[in-house]
Amino acid sequence: MSQQEGEMERQESEEEVEQAGRATESSPQQRRLERKARRRREREAEAERAAESPDESVHLKVFRYDPDVPEKQKPRFDHFYVPDKRGLTVLDALIYARDHFDSTLTVRHSCRQAICGSDAVFINGSQRLACQTQVSDLDSPVQVEPLPHQEVIKDLVVEMEHFYDQMHAVEPYFQTDEKPDDDLEEQRQSRENREEIKTATRCIWCGACMSSCNIAAGDNRYLGPAAINAAYRFAMDEREGESVTEHRLNLMDQEHGVWRCQTQFSCTNVCPKDIPLTQHIQELKREAVKKNLSFW
């Protein structure tokens, strides 16, 4: 927090105290204002202690941008000092900075258990899930930016519509030619086949792989590793109908499908669920070649 911002915070706090003193007509309102002013003073004191004790705090360097606020339309980095503690994640630190220092700080998050995939950001030069990344594993300062190669909406939030469009383009849902005679009977799958596609089912649609891919950055029509992985998951499922599998392979066997991958492994390296994305893309290339082979 800058000195100017700190001065503004103190002035607002003093105004709230004065307002609380004037609120004699309604005692509940007076108590509410007093509590609000007290919490603000406590936050200020805690922030000052963290800044004065660098060994006991985490230095966050956070990308800031807000197109709706004139003075924030030029991208910049803000610095926050967050009290350190065992098990502190980057998301924990961002939430603390938002709740105690700047309520306008914006970051997507939901489950905080590396399942929803909504808090993928660029941390110290790598795509990561903020809720999964331990601050203790990072060098200081911890620099947090929005995902590269994506349009920034505000601060750490990026536009994900194009990513979702690519995912839906491969029809990521189960399709079969035949159903069991009994409505209550399951469509059985062998354990071997389940093991084959198990890692592909872990995808949480976070977009980290797409952001790391240099090909996707330069080719807006490239399906990308996440979408191709989704196609792999269903194309390799033995319960899928043969006609649908052929249809999926035709979707992949295109200029902007599997053949745009240059095997850089960047997607595999950043995947928070350890999915071998590059391997799956190569296996679909092999299946596409086999489909096109003719013997006569």
Image (cartoon, rainbow, N blue to C red):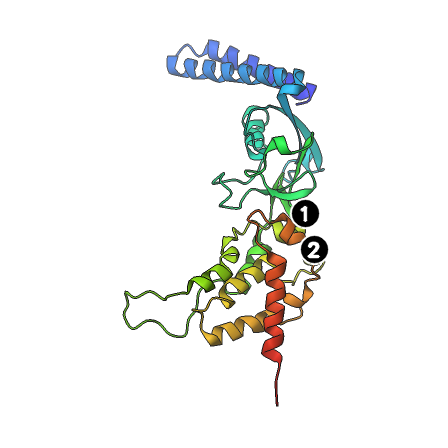
* Secondary structure beneath label 1: loop
**Snapshot quadrant of residue 1:** top right
Distance from Cα at disc 1 to Cα at disc 2: 9 Å
Residue 27, horizontal then vertical, whole percent? 38, 12
Residue 223, horizontal then vertical, whole percent? 61, 62
In the rendered image, the quadrant that contains the C terminus is: bottom right
**Snapshot quadrant of residue 175:** bottom left
Disc 2 crowd, CA 10 A, few/some/many (<14, 14-19, 20+):
some
Q: Is residue 24 above or below residue 266?
A: above
Front one among 254 and 113: 113
Q: Is residue 90 above or below residue 279?
A: above
Residue 237, horizontal then vertical, whole percent? 47, 66
| Earlier-in-chain disc, 1 versus 2 | 1
Residue 64, horizontal then vertical, whole percent? 66, 35
Q: Are marks 1 and 2 in contact (CB under 8 Å)?
A: yes
Residue located beneath label 1 in the image: 148
Front one among 230 and 150: 230
Side (left or right) of 146 relative to 229? right
Q: How many marks?
A: 2
Q: Residue furthest front?
A: 192
Q: Which mark is residue 217?
A: 2
Q: Give the amino acid type for the residue marked by disc 2 in the picture.
A: Ala
Residue at 67%, 20% (x, y): give it.
54
Residue at 46%, 15% (x, y): give it.
35
Side (left or right) of 214 relative to 108? right
Q: Is residue 46 visible?
A: yes
Q: Residue furthest bottom?
A: 296
Q: Is residue 174 above or below residue 207?
A: below
Residue at 63%, 48% (x, y): give it.
270
Q: Which mark is residue 134?
A: none
